[in-house]
Image (spheres, helix red, strand yellow):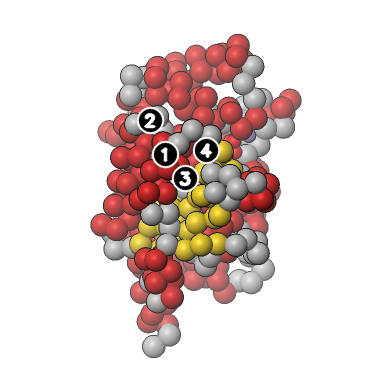
Amino acid sequence: MTDFHLRYGTEVAQALREQGPVVALESTIVSHGLPRPDNLRVARQIEQAVRDAGAVPATIGMIAGELVVGLDDTELTRLATADGVTKLSVRDLAPAAATGADGATTVAATSAVAATAGIGLFATGGLGGVHREAAQTFDESADLVTLARTPIAVVCAGVKSILDVGATLERLETLGVSVVGYRSRRFPGFFVTDSGFDLDWSVDSPERVADVLAARGQHRAHHGGLIVANPLPTDEQLDPDLHDRTLTEGLALLERDGVTGKAVTPYLLSHFHSATQGASLAVNVRIILRNADLAARIAVAAARRHAVAST
Ligand code: PSU
Ligand code: MN
């Protein structure tokens, strides 16, 4: 992944020059994943969570055809509030750049751009994955295949529970993407703490994650991503019964309205937020803030390690 023209925010450019801790953030959760007007406030809070933990946030998105690593507040506001902001996966970057579009980058596109920029950590809410009807629809997020070839660590609360979690984990195995639980041997279920699936690996501090990253850097055969799966504490999750009811309902509505393709994820998330009267939104925000904090602490540990190694 090279050759995109990138414009850097001033603070991000400086941090990268100094090899300081930087955390990439995606913009699709802002434009398409969270309802207005909360989305802009939350986008700012996510950046603040990264700063509070000692790293520099680099929210990535496209402004008038230009990919920006480290959107400023005006640009962030534009992606959060303007009409006609396109959801950009990796395959959309070239056509969007050529047509001068405003766009928000998904996990896939953000990972690709961040890795090109030399950023090793990325925080989001939940990854895309294999959809429940994938055996018929072939709907599998480009997040998975992109992580297979992109050297980046993504801190997330697993994959959205709207997906087929078991199939997603199988695909991650096939694609060679490492998955480690943060202080847990269970794969998180995004809104809920436990997806019901086991993990082979668990790490219990930012320093130990930095160890994994350093080990991976020494294995040149492994160029893919690392997923750091950070579950919500059980007392902060969405009530699992409410979750299951809302999901069943949402999947039925999806079929009724004939929603397919890239509209599926935003549709289901927005159903959750309205059907739970904001309860899922509060949980979603907690997830992202916790992940931003953990990613920043890992970035700090990795930068410290690097500084020690080069003295
Ligand atoms: N997780 C969330 N909210 C989101 C997304 C993930 O909690 O809005 C977005 C991410 O940008 C992810 C994308 O990359 O949804 C996946 O979309 P798709 O399934 O169309 O690949
Ligand atoms: Mn899809």
Badge 2 is on which residue? 36
In front of the other: 113 or 124: 113
In front of the other: 221 or 126: 126
Badge 3 is on which residue? 27
Residue 107 coordinates in the image, percent (x, y): 54, 47
Where is 226 relative to 78, above or below? below
Q: Is residue 227 visible?
A: no
Residue 85 badge: 4
- Closer to the chain start, of discs 3 and 1, is 3
**Residues tagged 4 and 3 counted as in contact (Cβ below 8 A):** no
What is the secondary structure assignment of the residue under circle 4? loop
- What amino acid type is highlighted by mark number 4? Val
Q: Distance of mark 1 from mark 2, alpha carbons?
A: 8 Å
- Closer to the chain start, of discs 1 and 2, is 2
In front of the other: 270 or 218: 270
What is the secondary structure assignment of the residue under circle 3? loop
User: What is the crowding at mark 2: few (fewer than 14 residues within 10 Å), some, or many (at least 20)?
Assistant: few
Quarter-of-image position of residue 284: top left
User: What is the crowding at mark 3: few (fewer than 14 residues within 10 Å), some, or many (at least 20)?
Assistant: many
- What amino acid type is highlighted by mark number 2? Arg
**Residues tagged 1 and 2 counted as in contact (Cβ below 8 A):** yes
Residue 103 coordinates in the image, percent (x, y): 54, 44
- Closer to the chain start, of discs 4 and 1, is 1
- What amino acid type is highlighted by mark number 1? Ala
Q: Distance of mark 4 from mark 3, alpha carbons?
A: 10 Å
Q: Distance of mark 2 from mark 3, alpha carbons?
A: 14 Å
